Amino acid sequence: MPAHALPEVFTEITVDPFVRGWLHRASNGTGDALVLTHGAGGNCNAPLLVILAETFCAAGITVLRCDLPYRQSRPYGPPGPHDGKRDRAGLKNAIDVMKNLSSGRIFLGGQSYGGRQASILCSEEPVDSPTAVSALLLLSYPLHPPGKPEQLRTQHLTNLRTRTLFVEGTRDPFASIPEIEQALQLIPAETRLLTVEGAGHDLGFKGKSKRDQLPAKVLTEFQKLLSE
């Protein structure tokens, strides 16, 4: 039997905000599951998220790629200044859904804005909470706006007690590698950093450009994080 099948359209409308996206079910899987969401300008069909979902699914982890509530409300454009709280509520609902579908650990991941909201949500949840996740995957964490290193988005990191893998390009205008390394020192949990040489904020997945080895490297580093 193949390690994974084609993704299924997934919706859960009994919760508010509701959950919408694509479910990659792992055959003969570990029972573990990953909720994965997108950045400010995209949606859950971003090429990086698709290939990561396929890679994790092939390793036995069921993956839900989901649209944040702001993207469910409007197909284009960035989130508004007051969308964060509702977007985090949407991620929490997605986690609850996956807990009902899975027998193992639940992981949470996000690209850029989605990763930031994921990390804030985890910093707000006690580690022994029924809705707490076992690990975080943060892709291109937006540490500060481009060209404004003084506007750091690190306030919640001192309360983040979820082990976390950061994946960062060395040419990302939202954070230099030294800035990310300094931010990691604020987190009172196990962290790992995977750097992508020469990549910008898109980690090399813009347009037709792809870093074919990156998904496997992300999976390997994530598995190392879980074993520590």
Image (tube, rainbow, N blue to C red):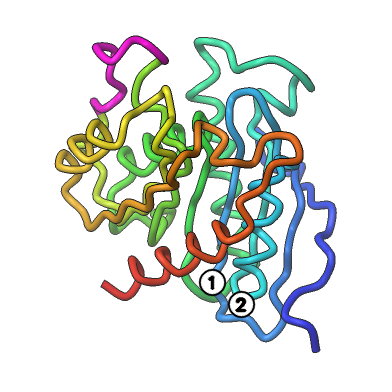
- The residue lying toward the viewer, choosing from 179 and 49, is 179
Residue visible at 58% across and 45% down? 93
* Mark drawn on residue 60: 2
| Marks 1,2: beta carbons within 8 A | yes
Badge 2 amino acid: Gly
- The residue lying toward the viewer, choosing from 2 and 71, is 2
Residue visible at 41% across and 52% down? 136
Count of marks placed on residues:
2
Q: In which quarter of the image is the N terminus?
A: bottom right
Residue 111, x across and y down, in percent: 53, 39
**Distance between the alpha carbons at the discs numbered 1 and 2:** 8 Å
Label 1: how many Cα within 10 Å (few below 14, some 14–19, many 20+): many
Residue 196, x across and y down, in percent: 44, 47
Badge 1 amino acid: Asp
**Circle 1: element type:** loop
* Mark drawn on residue 163: none
Residue visible at 57% across and 59% down? 215
Label 2: how many Cα within 10 Å (few below 14, some 14–19, many 20+): some
- Specify the quadrant of the image occupied by residue 34: bottom right
Residue 79, x across and y down, in percent: 60, 17
Residue visible at 48% across and 60% down? 218
- The residue lying toward the viewer, choosing from 141 and 214, is 214
- Specify the quadrant of the image occupied by residue 203: top right
Prevailing secondary structure class for the magenta stretch in the rendered image: loop
Looking at the image, the residue that sits furthest to the bottom is: 1
Q: Which residue is identified by label 1?
A: 32
Residue 43, x across and y down, in percent: 70, 34
**Circle 2: element type:** loop
Q: Is 77 on the left or on the right of 10, as rendered?
A: left
Magenta span = 146-155
